[in-house]
Image (spheres, rainbow, N blue to C red):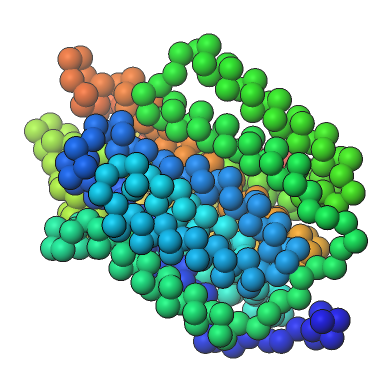
């Protein structure tokens, strides 16, 4: 084992390809619900509020599991934990495919939610078995294929559900996940677990999971039916109390789940703040554009169906996948700060242009592509920088915290955009006024521009 730690076995293209295809299948399984949600509501005879639980359940589970999976991967080896997580995801996918009712489908989504932990575990394997330059490229490829999986799920969920049944849109990606897990098990060398004289920091894991769970449940509830101010305040108090308890436990633990000194490093907390800002802006764009496509053509909308919306969003999904694969390379060649500035300027300018230019479909298609490029390059560059800036033993937990930050940013951006559309609904209808979309695009542009301020502040701190 010590020899493996000194001279790790290098992995080849087949192993990286297997990880990439696994990420593609996971991204597909994660994204099939959104375009097929109206069908699921009809088939299961549930209300829209109940149907919304299907997608949100996976989001909540993923946010809770990701940091735990990353830490366990650092401790026990990325391959070992990845294979076990994929067994859980596969069980969830098959259960969802056989679900006769909403409770069983929700249970399947809970099990599928652990797929979010696969990304930091893949980064551990890449970091352990490739040199720094090659690992940055491989991380970008895995992220790009996960993003591409979202594109595949969005495009083919409808045709599969309509041609076969909605059950098959869960079963088919799950079959690929099972196959690729077997390939990874055979091809990927074992990465040696980190040696430690102390046990797992279970209190820290429980408190961090509780903090994320309380936060995400509150966010999901506010995104749905809304909450009274008193309930929002109560959730904020609970989240603050859990977070405070977690910090206290981590400071006293002999082997903390998260080394707070790692979080204090500029490379780490700068990446978290910037990732949150970038993904919040992108989350708003990702929510607003499909809504605008779906608004009735009687007025300012386009009146498109699910399949047509997926086709119009395809160029943006492709652009996002390509930019994810190039983020690390671009940062290494041009510098991280330059990549972040260009991405922020492109996104902010695009959103400002949408304020007045949103009457033709091609304008929205181009806007989604540009926003996806700006967000994809920036967040992947931050992720690859963080993966190579921290100690090797902390790769999993550091990258998983950034993955969770991305989830929170996108969910928060969607919530803000949804609130803007609800507030701008036409009297007596659920249809938002055109001015609501204009406001949403303007706010998304301001949030994107905020990242420029964050970059400037972090530069001054680095110089100091």
State the quadrant of the C terminus.
top right
Looking at the image, the residue that sits furthest to the left is 298
What residue is rendered at 71% in x and 57% in y?
A: 71
Q: Quadrant of residue 276?
A: top right
At which x and y percent is residue 293?
A: 22, 43
Can residue 186 be seen in this snapshot?
A: yes
In the image, residue 315 above or below residue 282: below
The residue depicted at 13 percent of the width and 36 percent of the height is 296
Q: In this view of the protein, which residue sits in the foreground, 16 or 346?
A: 16
Q: Is residue 105 above or below residue 131?
A: above
Q: Nearer the viewer, residue 370 or 31?
A: 31
Q: Residue at x 52, y 87 (%)?
A: 14
Q: Residue furthest top?
A: 230
In the image, taking residue 390 as reference, residue 147 lies left or right, namely left
Residue under the point 56% across and 70% down = 83
The mark total stands at: 0
Camera sees residue 389: no
Placement of the N terminus among the 4 image quadrants: bottom right
Q: Quadrant of residue 384?
A: bottom right
Q: Is residue 133 left or right of residue 277?
A: right
Residue 42 placement: quadrant: top left
Residue 353 versus residue 131 in the image, above or below: above
Q: Nearer the viewer, residue 462 or 120?
A: 120
Measured from the top left, where is residue 212 in percent x and y?
Answer: 60, 38
Image coordinates for residue 92, horizontal then vertical, percent: 42, 57
Percent of width and height locating residue 350: 40, 46
Q: Considering depth in this image, is 111 or 131 the residue closer to the camera? A: 111
């Amino acid at each position: 084992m010590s020899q493996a730690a000194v001279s790790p076995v290098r992995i080849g293209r087949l192993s990286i390809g297997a990880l990439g295809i696994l990420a593609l299948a996971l991204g597909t399984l994660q994204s099939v619900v959104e375009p097929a949600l109206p069908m699921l509501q009809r088939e299961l005879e549930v209300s829209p509020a109940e149907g919304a639980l299907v997608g949100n359940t996976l989001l909540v589970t993923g946010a809770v599991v990701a940091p735990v999976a990353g830490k366990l991967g650092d401790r026990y080896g990325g391959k070992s934990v990845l294979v076990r997580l994929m067994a859980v995801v596969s069980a969830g996918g098959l259960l969802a495919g056989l679900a006769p009712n909403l409770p069983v489908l929700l249970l399947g989504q809970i099990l599928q939610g652990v797929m979010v932990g696969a990304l930091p575990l893949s980064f551990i394997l890449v970091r352990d078995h490739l040199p720094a330059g090659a690992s940055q490229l491989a991380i970008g490829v895995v992220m790009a294929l996960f993003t591409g999986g979202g594109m595949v799920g969005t495009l083919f969920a409808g045709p599969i559900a309509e041609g076969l049944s909605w059950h098959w849109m869960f079963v088919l990606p799950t079959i690929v996940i099972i196959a690729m897990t077997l390939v990874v098990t055979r091809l990927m060398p074992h990465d040696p677990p980190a040696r430690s004289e102390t046990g797992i920091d279970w209190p820290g894991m429980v408190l961090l999971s509780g903090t994320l769970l309380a936060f995400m449940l509150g966010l999901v509830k506010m995104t749905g039916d809304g909450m009274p101010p008193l309930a929002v305040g109560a959730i904020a108090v609970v989240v603050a109390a859990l977070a405070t308890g977690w910090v206290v436990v981590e400071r006293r633990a002999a082997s903390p789940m998260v080394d707070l000194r790692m979080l204090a490093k500029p490379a780490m907390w700068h990446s978290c703040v910037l990732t949150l800002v970038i993904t919040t802006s992108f989350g708003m764009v990702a929510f607003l554009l499909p809504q605008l496509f779906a608004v009735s053509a009687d007025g300012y909308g386009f009146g498109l169906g699910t399949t047509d919306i997926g086709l119009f969003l395809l160029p943006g999904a492709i652009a996002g996948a390509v930019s994810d694969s190039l983020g690390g390379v671009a940062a290494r060649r041009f510098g991280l700060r330059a990549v972040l500035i260009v991405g922020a300027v492109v996104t902010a300018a695009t959103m400002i242009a949408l304020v007045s230019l949103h009457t033709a479909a091609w304008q929205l298609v181009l806007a989604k592509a540009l926003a996806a490029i700006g967000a994809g390059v920036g967040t992947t560059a931050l992720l690859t920088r963080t993966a190579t800036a921290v100690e090797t033993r902390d790769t999993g937990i550091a990258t998983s915290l950034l993955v969770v930050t991305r989830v929170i940013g996108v969910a928060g951006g969607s919530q803000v955009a949804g609130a803007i559309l609800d507030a701008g609904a036409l009297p007596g209808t659920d249809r938002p006024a055109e001015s609501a979309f204009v406001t949403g695009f303007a706010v998304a542009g301001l949030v994107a521009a905020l990242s420029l301020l964050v970059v400037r502040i972090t530069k001054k701190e680095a110089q100091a």
